Every structure is written in C-alpha cells, then in structure tokens.
Image (cartoon, grey):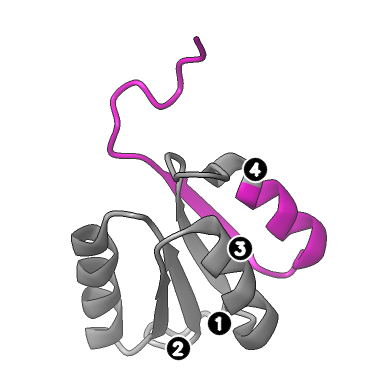
Amino acid sequence: MPAIAGSGKILIVDDEVKVSDTLALILSALGYDTRVAYSAEKALETFAEWAPDLAIVDVMLPEMNGIDLAIVLKANYPACRLVLFSGQPDASRSE
C-alpha cells in the first residue's frame, strides 16, 4: 500500500452492512478508493476484478470464515496486505 495517506485501494469484507458501509465511508472521505464485500465469496469475485492493496476482513463471516478467506487471499494475491478483525468477544476461542 502506498505510503501517502489517502491513496490506494481498500476492500472491506464484513457481513454487517452498517459496519462495512461506515468504514468504507470513513476511508473514502480520507481519499482511499474503497469497495465493500458482504461475504467471502463476493470478496473473491472483487479481488479477481479489482485487486485491492489492502483488505480489512471480519473473522466471523457466514459460509467461509475470514481466516480461511485470508489463507486463500495470501496464496493468490501475496502483494495484498490483510487486516483481520472481529467484533465478537469469543472470536479467538475454538469449541
């Protein structure tokens, strides 16, 4: 991702529409080119056509979770930086 603030393409991947859209608005206001994907599957489609510099990925996604998505993304798009996050307090626990 370029060192200059407000440059670069950022993909936000989160199934919570309000979270995704709010983060996209904030980053867009700072000058970043942003897109939102509400599922891992949509994120993979977006990567294929748009190639972001950074992906901000929720760990807790339906179908394919964010960790599995991150593994696929790093294997196929090694230049893209990834940030994983979760709003769930128990996201790191395995049951």
Q: In the rendered structure, which amino acid carries the disc numbered 2?
A: Ser
Distance of mark 2 from mark 4, alpha carbons? 28 Å
- Regarding mark 1 in the picture, which secondary structure is present there? loop
Query: Which numbered tag is attached to residue 7?
Result: 2
Residue 13's quadrant in the figure?
Answer: bottom left
Mark in front: 3 vs 1: 3
- Mark toward the start of the polypeptide (3 vs 4): 4
Which residue is at 22% across, 79% downward?
25
Local packing at callout 4 (Cα closer than 10 Å; few below 14, some 14-19, many 20+) is few
**Nearer to us: label 3 or label 4:** 4
Q: Quadrant of residue 23?
A: bottom left
Residue nearest the viewer, comparing 69 with 34 = 69
Residue 32 image offset from top left, x and y in percent: 38, 85
Q: Which residues are magenta?
A: 69-95
Q: Are marks 2 and 4 in contact (CB under 8 Å)?
A: no
User: Residue at 63% across / 67% down in the picture?
Assistant: 44
Mark 1 and mark 4: span between their CA atoms?
26 Å
Estimate the x, y position of residue 56 in percent, counting from the top left.
45, 60
User: Disc number at residue 56?
Assistant: none
Does label 1 or label 4 sit earlier along the sequence? 1
Identity, as a three-letter code, of the amino acid under mark 4: Asp
Q: Which residue occupies the foreground of this view, 30 or 36?
A: 36
* Residue 7 among magenta residues: no
Q: Amino acid at mark 3?
A: Arg
CB under 8 Å between discs 1 and 2: yes
Q: Which residue is mark 3?
A: 81
Residue 92, percent from left and from top: 45, 23
**Which residue is the site of mark 1?**
2
Residue type marked 1? Pro
Query: Which is nearer the N-term, disc 2 or disc 4?
Result: 2
